[in-house]
Amino acid sequence: MSDSVGFWKRLFAGVLDGIIISAPLAIIFGVITGDWEDENFSTLFNFLYMVIVPILWYGYTVGKRIMGIRIVRMDGKKLGIGTMLLRYLVAALVYAITLGIGFIVSAFMVGIRKDHRSIHDFIAGTYVTSNEP
């Protein structure tokens, strides 16, 4: 797994997804509903984006595609709904239960570990690579 991607590329991909996808969604739903404090719809669509787009687009999100990285399964099989739900939903629960400490530990894991895998990668059996499909 020498092709696994480290902290900075993953971070910038997440920032790009936030700028290109999440922020516009929040603005659109704020304009449509007139409620700028209720983030339920934009959060739901953002979650669906993070789960469904990589399944349909070979592990890419818009930010990951721009950075030339993508999510893949350790066993080489195609990403599926179960893998992506584990990666985002179960991992989010772990991060919430640990009051964010798990998230911080994950960031260090990506930066320090030789394979650059985080807690959510271990939960879902995935890693992030720069290899094309």
Image (cartoon, rainbow, N blue to C red):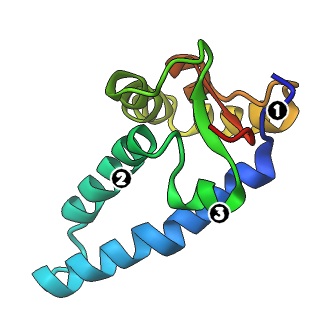
Q: Amino acid at mark 1?
A: Asp
19 horizontally vs 70: left or right: left
Of the two numbered discs 2 and 1 in the rendering, the one whose residue sits closer to the viewer: 1
The foreground one among 86 and 37 is 86
Decide: few, some or many residues near mark 3? Use Cα within 10 Å; few <14, some 14-19, many ≥20.
Answer: few
Q: Earlier in the sequence, mark 3 or mark 1?
A: 1
Say which residue label 1 marks: 3
Local SS, label 2: helix
Decide: few, some or many residues near mark 2? Use Cα within 10 Å; few <14, some 14-19, many ≥20.
Answer: some
The foreground one among 121 and 75 is 75
Q: Residue at x 41, y 67 (%)?
A: 22
User: Would you place residue 50 above or below residue 122 in this image?
Assistant: below
Q: Earlier in the sequence, mark 2 or mark 1?
A: 1
Residue 39 lies, in percent from the top left, at: 25, 65
Q: Quadrant of the N terminus?
A: top right
Q: Which mark is residue 49?
A: 2
Rendered image quadrant of residue 38: bottom left
Residue furthest to the left = 33
Residue 127 lies, in percent from the top left, at: 65, 28
The foreground one among 128 and 117 is 128
Say which residue label 3 marks: 66
